[in-house]
Amino acid sequence: GQHRPDSQSRSLCHAPILTQRRAAQPCGLGRGMAPPGRRDDVGRSRRWLPEAVSVVQKTIFAGPMWVALLGLEGTGHHGICESLVPRCEMVAESGEPCLAFDADMQIVVRQLAFALPDSLSWWRRKLSKRLTFYANLSSSKRILFQCSPSSESVHPHWSFMMSYPDAELGMQRSAAEEGKVTAHPDAVAMALAAERAGLDARFVVLRRDAADAVASISKRSALAFDVAARILRDNEAILEWQLRRLSPDFLFELPFESAPAEAAALAAFLRLNESALEESLSQRFRVTTHALSGAERAYVRHLWR
C-alpha cells in the first residue's frame, strides 16, 4: 500500500529520494525561487552558495493516518473539505472509521504557528503527544484538524482551513504589522513530528491558477486585487520552500481545475473508496473561474514570473 512516485503519480518531485538534496536543484512547482545559501565575501563582491537541505523521509506506518491540506488561500480548501469530511462510507476497508476532525489538534497547530520563544518547546511537546496518541489508536482513522471550527475560532461558524495564509489565524494571533501574511502552518515540523511519533502523515497539496486564486480572495474580502496578489505570491514562496524539504512520498498534488478527475489517484493516496470519492467530488467540488481583465492577469504573471 505504499505510495510511490512514478509517471502516473501526482507527487511533487520525481527525482530519486535523497537524504540531502542540493537546494539549487529544481523540485516541485516552485517558480523563480532563489536557492537558500550562505554569503561568501570575496573582496567587495558577494555571492550566494547553495547549501545542502535536509529532506524529511517518509515512512509508511500501519494504523491511523494524519491528513493535512496544504495550499495557498483561494485554492479550493472549502470544496475539498465538503468532499471529504465526514464521509464514512468512503473508507475502502469495510467497517473502518471515516476521516475524522480533531479540535484539540487544531488548537495545537494554531498555537504552534505563533508560539513565543519561551513557549515553542512546550507546544512542540503537545504536538508530539497528540500525534503519539493517534499512532497508538487501534483503528485506522484518517484524522484532519482542518475543515471545521474549534473553541478557538474567531467566528464559530467559520471553518478553519489553515491555508497559506490563513485569514482567521491572522486576525486571531498576528501582530498588527504582520496582518495575515505570516499566518500559515509549518509542514516540515508536522512531518518530522509525525515520523518521530510513528504516525502515517500525508499532505494533499492544493493547486489553482494563480490569478483565479487571487480573484477568489479579493472578491470575498476587503483586500484589493494587487494586495491579495502580493500576499499570495510571498506565501507561495514559503509553501514551496517547505515542500522542497519533504520527501515526495508525503505529498499528493490536487489541481483545482481537474479535481473531480483525480478521484481515483486521491482515493489510492488516502486509502479511500474510489467510487464514493469520485461521486462526492463530482457533487460537492465546484470548479469555477473568474472574469478578470487582461491587465489583472498580466499583473499576476508579472509577480509569478
Image (cartoon, rainbow, N blue to C red):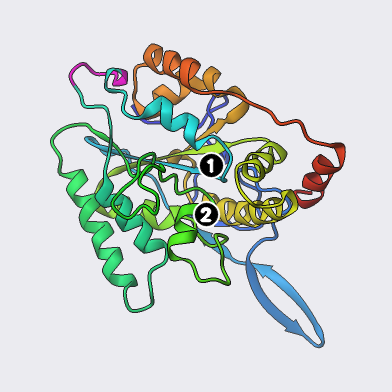
Q: Which residues lie in the magenta part?
A: 90-95
Of 193 and 14, the residue lying toward us: 193
Q: Is residue 291 above or below residue 240?
A: above
Of 294 and 33, the residue lying toward us: 294
**Majority secondary structure of magenta residues:** loop
Secondary element type, mark 2: helix
Percent across and percent down for residue 85 are: 35, 30
Percent across and percent down for residue 182 are: 53, 62
Q: Residue at x 65, y 57 (%)?
A: 234
Magenta-colored stretch includes residue 92? yes
Q: Residue furthest left?
A: 138
Q: Residue at x 75, y 74 (%)?
A: 47
The residue under label 1 is 16
Q: Residue at x 54, y 37 (%)?
A: 206
Q: Earlier in the sequence, mark 1 or mark 2?
A: 1
Secondary element type, mark 1: loop
Numbered badge on residue 294: none
Amino acid type, mark 1: Pro
Q: Is residue 57 above or below residue 256?
A: below
Gap between marks 1 and 2, in whole Å?
18 Å
Amino acid type, mark 2: Gln
